[in-house]
């Protein structure tokens, strides 16, 4: 019994694990509450679409979470998502091979990640200002790429339909391909964060950028890598959104800046940098999707849903700041 307790204590002593466990407990509690309110909530007809709806939240949460661990923020993720959806859909509607369209789309989105890295890591622009600028630029690109119009349907040609199936509609049994792709992306970046030098450097500059620099960490390169990951995740989220709608919408990705922050902070990633685990983002994204689904089934108005989510996000950030300040006070004593 004592060994089990020691093992549990060691497990909970892992930095950030307590927040992750709390987030997953929140997922279970929400599932129970919404099931009591409406038994159809745990029915297959709701759970399958729910699993698919988590994907874009998880993707932007991964990117935003990694950027937050560096001590920065990325306000451009929603606009990059919208730009991704519009570029890929516009190219396909104009006869470009869907595979080539996706490649061009990824390159365009990664370019935004490089720009963010240069602005924040090289020129020391405050991340709020730098990514606010690229957010506006990317939204403008999303608007002009098809002449200020949403695109038409991307069509049902084999490759176009295959793209839609790959990112949204296709499934193996009850598991959608989009869910599998999202989890693969999560596994790759979770491995990078936990088992590679790049991951250690990302945590290091978030903990203390000056100490990291003195230790030989290339702050500019590491910051750029974090923003590249964020741009890539937003790009894939844009492809998921485009595949779901079968078209490009200039409004795609609106408010996803908040969704990314919500998934990250609810999952226990600190907005102050240097701490947090990507496994928590799964719980954070799930909390968001469950709230959206559950409140919709409960006929709660959209405005009230936004208020509830906003309160939860602010509470999570406030709790993180209080916890970090408490730790500092304890150390000083």
Image (tube, rainbow, N blue to C red):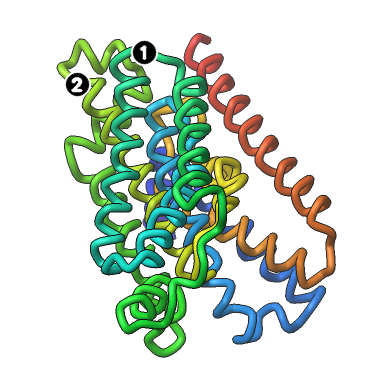
**Place of residue 50 in the rendered image (x, y in percent of width and height, measured from the top left):** 58, 72
- Residue 35 numbered tag: none
- Residue 124 numbered tag: 1
- Looking at the rendered image, the quarter that the N terminus falls into is bottom left
The residue lying at 67 percent from left, 69 percent from top is 31
* Mark 2 or mark 1, earlier in chain: 1
Give the left or right position of residue 240, taking residue 33 as reference: left
- Name the residue nearer the viewer: 31 or 148: 148
**Place of residue 230 in the rendered image (x, y in percent of width and height, measured from the top left):** 38, 42
**Place of residue 19 in the rendered image (x, y in percent of width and height, measured from the top left):** 53, 44
Question: What secondary structure is found at the residue carrying circle 2?
Answer: loop
- Residue 217 numbered tag: 2
Residue 46 shows in this picture: yes
The residue lying at 41 percent from left, 52 percent from top is 84
Foreground mark, 2 or 1, reads: 1
**Place of residue 270 in the rendered image (x, y in percent of width and height, measured from the top left):** 49, 33
In the displayed structure, 139 sits above or below 91; it is above
Give the left or right position of residue 194, taking residue 238 as reference: left
The residue lying at 70 percent from left, 78 percent from top is 41
Sort mark 2 into few (<14), some (14-19) or many (20+) by Cα contacts within 10 Å: many
Alpha-carbon span between mark 2 and mark 1: 16 Å
In the displayed structure, 56 sits above or below 216; it is below
- Name the residue nearer the viewer: 49 or 276: 49
Give the left or right position of residue 300, taking residue 267 as reference: right
Q: Residue furthest bottom?
A: 173
- Name the residue nearer the viewer: 250 or 205: 250
Locate residue 4: give its quadrant. bottom left
Residue 6 shows in this picture: no
């Amino acid at each position: 019994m004592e060994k089990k307790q020691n093992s549990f204590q060691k497990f909970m002593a892992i930095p950030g694990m307590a927040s992750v466990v709390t987030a997953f407990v929140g997922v279970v509690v929400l599932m129970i509450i919404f099931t009591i309110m409406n038994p159809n909530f745990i029915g297959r007809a709701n759970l399958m679409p729910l699993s698919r709806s988590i994907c874009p939240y998880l993707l932007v949460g991964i990117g935003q979470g990694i950027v937050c661990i560096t001590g920065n923020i990325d306000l451009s993720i929603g606009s990059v998502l919208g730009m991704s959806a519009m570029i890929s859909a516009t190219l396909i509607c104009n006869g470009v091979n869907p595979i080539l369209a996706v490649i061009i789309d990824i390159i365009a989105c990664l370019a935004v990640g490089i720009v963010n890295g240069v602005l924040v890591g090289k020129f020391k622009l405050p991340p709020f200002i730098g990514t606010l600028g690229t957010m506006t630029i990317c939204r403008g690109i999303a608007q002009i790429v098809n002449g200020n119009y949403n695109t038409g349907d991307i069509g049902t040609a084999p490759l176009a339909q295959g793209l839609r199936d790959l990112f949204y509609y296709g499934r193996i049994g009850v598991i959608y391909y989009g869910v599998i792709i999202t989890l693969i992306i999560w596994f790759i970046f979770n491995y990078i964060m936990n088992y590679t030098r790049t991951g250690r450097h990302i945590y290091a500059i978030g903990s203390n950028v000056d100490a990291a620099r003195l230790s030989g960490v290339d702050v500019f390169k590491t910051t750029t890598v974090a923003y590249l990951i964020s741009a890539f995740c937003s790009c894939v989220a844009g492809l998921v959104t485009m595949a779901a709608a079968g078209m490009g919408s200039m409004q795609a990705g609106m408010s996803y800046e908040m969704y990314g922050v919500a998934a990250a902070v609810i999952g226990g990633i600190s907005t102050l940098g240097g701490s947090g685990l990507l496994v928590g983002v799964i719980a954070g994204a799930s909390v968001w999707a469950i709230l959206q689904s559950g409140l919709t089934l409960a006929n709660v108005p959209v405005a009230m849903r936004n208020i509830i989510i906003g309160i939860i996000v602010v509470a999570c950030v406030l709790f993180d700041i209080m916890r970090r300040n408490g730790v500092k006070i304890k150390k000083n004593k």
